[in-house]
Image (spheres, helix red, strand yellow):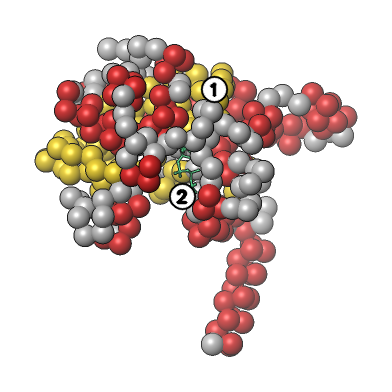
């Protein structure tokens, strides 16, 4: 069985939920405390044993490439000022090869993944969405790779959402489960309110076999007028088994306003440098808003 060594990070979406902030800045570059969102995702891939990453970019996404590139002028400046701790921080992702491909038009997540087909070739691979951070003791992608290593089949990361939220996600129709792993009869993208077959939602992490590209090649547009990865996964599931895995960890959706703000607060409260002052500030504003109401 081939090992999972490559990962695709799709980051070519328009980020319309975050306009106007994302008009000229990629949403994947929005900072959570002091690091861009996509850096957390690259680090998860590295910690999961991924050796090569391809980031799918598009118009206006140049900042992502610049971020992962070396900046010798900045490095020299930090060295001359003795700021070696910061120097260490800016080169974290040099431990992995990062490649880029452009999706010329944002036709959907399925199309973005398809754009990376030549880079992946005939190997299983991981997909990590560029705007979803997962905080976990064992990296989420590593959990999925371990599952792949036991079954040799594609495996999709899922978690439970509320009834109201199911219409925003790809939802699975489970047949049976063994521990955290589900056999699935159907993968449904954004089911209409009240029609979801379960509350288990696809959460931006996948390990897929290369046969998925055969289905993406001819995949027509689905929900939202986009070429959906979930629709191709459903077809893959009809020709070979695709499992769902209820991963351990907390998933943060940084691609929408409330998710971005709550993630920022949670991560800031874990940051030794600022957590005490932030907590004091939060207590203060809660007290003030209680007085007003
Ligand atoms: P989203 O649907 O969350 O991103 O896709 P979006 O389309 O940018 O968001 P909104 O709805 O307009 O606010 C999840 C991931 O897939 C990438 C996005 O960049 C994001 O990281 N994506 C999406 C692509 O790479 N290409 C696409 O055509 C669509």
Q: Residues within 10 Å of mark 1 (few under 14, many from 20)?
A: some
CB atoms of marks 1 and 2 within 8 Å:
no
Residue at x 51% of width, y 39% of height: 13
Q: Which residue is mark 2?
A: 253
Residue 275: image location, x then y, percent? 62, 58
Q: Secondary structure at mark 1?
A: strand
Q: Nearer the viewer, mark 1 or mark 2?
A: 1
Gap between marks 1 and 2 measured at Cα: 24 Å
Residue 278 in picture, x, y percent from top left: 64, 63
- Of residues 123 and 27, the one nearer the viewer is 27
Residue 166 visible, this angle: yes
In-image side of 56 versus 176 (left or right): right
On the image, the x and y values in percent for residue 188 come to 24, 43
Label 1 sits on residue: 101
Q: Is mark 2 within 8 Å of ligand 1?
A: yes
> Residue 186 is drawn in which quadrant?
top left
Q: Earlier in the sequence, mark 1 or mark 2?
A: 1
Q: Quadrant of the C terminus?
A: bottom right
Residue under the image location 16 percent in, 28 percent down: 238
Residue drawn at x 27%, y 26% as measured from the top left: 154
Q: In the image, is residue 9 above or below residue 27?
A: above
134 left or right of 70 in image: left
Farthest left residue?
175
Q: Is mark 1 within 8 Å of ligand 1?
A: no
């Amino acid at each position: 069985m081939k090992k999972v060594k490559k990962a695709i990070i799709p980051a070519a979406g328009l980020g319309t939920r975050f306009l106007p902030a994302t008009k000229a800045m990629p949403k994947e570059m929005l900072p959570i405390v002091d690091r861009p969102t996509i850096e957390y995702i690259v680090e998860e891939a590295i910690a999961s044993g991924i050796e090569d990453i391809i980031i799918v970019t598009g118009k206006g996404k140049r900042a992502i490439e610049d971020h992962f590139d070396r900046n010798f002028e900045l490095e020299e400046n930090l060295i001359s000022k003795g700021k070696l701790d910061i120097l260490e921080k800016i080169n974290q992702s040099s431990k992995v090869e990062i490649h880029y491909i452009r999706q010329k038009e944002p036709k959907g997540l399925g199309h973005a993944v398809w754009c990376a087909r030549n880079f992946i070739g005939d190997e299983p691979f991981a997909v990590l969405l560029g705007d979803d951070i997962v905080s976990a003791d064992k990296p989420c992608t590593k959990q999925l790779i371990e599952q792949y290593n036991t079954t040799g089949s594609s495996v999709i990361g899922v978690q439970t959402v509320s009834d109201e939220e199911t219409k925003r996600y790809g939802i699975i129709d489970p047949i049976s489960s063994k521990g955290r792993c589900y056999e699935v009869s159907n993968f449904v993208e954004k089911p209409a309110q009240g029609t979801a077959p379960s509350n288990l939602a696809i959460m931006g992490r996948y390990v897929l076999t290369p046969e998925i590209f055969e289905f993406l090649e001819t995949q027509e547009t689905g929900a939202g007028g986009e070429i959906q990865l979930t629709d191709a996964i459903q077809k893959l599931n009809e020709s070979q088994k695709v499992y769902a895995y209820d991963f351990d960890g907390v998933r943060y959706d940084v691609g929408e306003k409330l998710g971005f703000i709550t993630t920022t607060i949670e991560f800031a409260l874990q940051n030794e440098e600022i957590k005490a002052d932030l907590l004091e500030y939060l207590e203060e504003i809660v007290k003030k808003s209680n007085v007003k109401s």
